[in-house]
Amino acid sequence: MKTLTYIAIFLFASIGFIACYDDEGNYTYLSDYEAGEIVIDTFGLSQAERTALSTLYPGDTVELELNVNYAYMENLRYRWFALPLTNYSYEPVQVGNSLEYPPADTISYEKKLHWVVDFDPGQYRFYFMAEDSVRGLKAYFQMSNYGIIYTEGTFDGLYLLTEYDGETDIDVYTSELMLIYTGDSVVHRYYSQTTGQTIPGKPRFIHGSHTGSTSRDGYLVATDQTMLRLNSVGLTTMDTWEEMFYTVPDVFDPQECYFTNNADFLINDGQLHVLYTDQTNDRKFSTAISGDYDLASFLATRHAVPTVP
């Protein structure tokens, strides 16, 4: 007989899966580009066009064209490209003994984009560039703050740690009607179907989100035997318990974790560990915060309440 233990995390499609879009269109008069400026004008784009590079899956086809106004149109050449992101920001990566920014990935050199998505799953920032090949002028347009290419079969919804015969798996309740679920909207054993294995031990907690707002762009999953950091793309293991710390605690007892102010906070065996996600070189939990204390297994954040005069 299987025992089902549910530990839930809410991931809403309306928040977690749509990249933030900032309309940076150039609204100029004819005299501006007659004076020599390259103007990328996004006025009139539909909502679908604005978010065309926000949520993607391998094999998707994207067709998109932006208006360009310029006095010397015959000189223009174009480029669609993407910057690979880490934790939803463009960060340097370790190359040998130095940190280097990863190069941009070219998608197309045509003004009208026709792209069958062939990038690896991950986070990207997409750009369109128009360049005067004679005069050397360039204009850029950033399509969105970020876009995500998901692995095929990635789901949004309610993620639950579920115990099957003493092992832990992840079930997903996914529905366009948010918390109204039917049998067809439940994806059982999502983790084992995706990775080919279960997680040892009985469930404790899962924290994280596709938005990158927790756990370094992924999920912290704890059982009574192990804790893993799983990538939100494909649920691949980014870190094991032993890899999460500069100095691994003597006692394994993960009790709770929480993310706020660009930091992961973890209570293990009553002691507090911190990982600052916005620091380039801070990629592991600290040793326990010093002091004579024994924390309860509870973490939360307090939001200031405005004062009404």
Image (cartoon, helix red, strand yellow):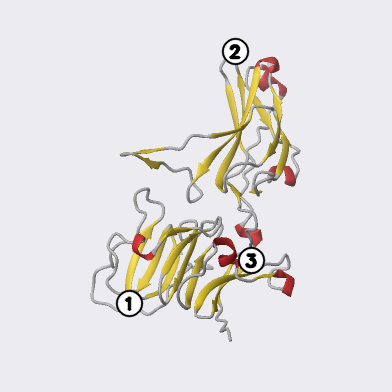
Amino acid type at mark 2: Val
Q: State which mark lies toward you, 3 or 2.
A: 3
Label 3, label 2: how far apart the Cα atoms are: 51 Å
Tell which circle, 3 or 2, labels the residue nearer the N-terminal end. Answer: 2
Q: Which residue is mark 3?
A: 157
Taking the spot 49% from the left edge, 56% from the top edge, the residue there is 217
- Amino acid type assigned to the residue bearing label 3 in the image: Gly
Please tell me whether mark 2 sits on a helix, a strand or a loop.
Answer: loop
Q: Are marks 3 and 2 in contact (CB under 8 Å)?
A: no
Residue in the picture at 46% in, 57% down: 216
- The percent position of residue 92, horizontal first and vertical second, equals 41, 41
Name the residue rendered at 74%, 70% in the picture.
184
| Pick the front one: 224 or 194 | 194
User: Disc 2 to disc 1, how far (Cα)?
Assistant: 66 Å
Q: Which residue is mark 2?
A: 134
Q: For the point 63% across and 17% down, which residue is it?
A: 36
Among the two numbered marks 2 and 1 on one chain, the one whose residue lies closer to the N terminus? 2
| Vertical comparison of 73 with 87: above or below | above
Task: Kindly state the secondary structure of the residue where label 3 is placed.
Answer: loop
Q: Tell me the element at label 1.
A: loop
Residue 117 seen in the figure: yes
Question: Left of 287 or right of it: where is 147?
Answer: right
Q: In the rendered image, which residue does mark 1 sit on? A: 270
Quarter of the image for residue 119 reads top right
Visible in this render: residue 182? no
Q: Is residue 129 above or below residue 296?
A: above
Taking depth in this image into account, of 30 and 306 the one nearest to the observer is 30
Task: Please tell me the numbered disc located at residue 171.
Answer: none
Q: Earlier in the sequence, mark 1 or mark 3?
A: 3
Horizontal side of 74 relative to 87 (left or right) equals right
Residue 78 x, y percent position in the rendering: 64, 25
Q: Quadrant of the N terminus?
A: bottom right
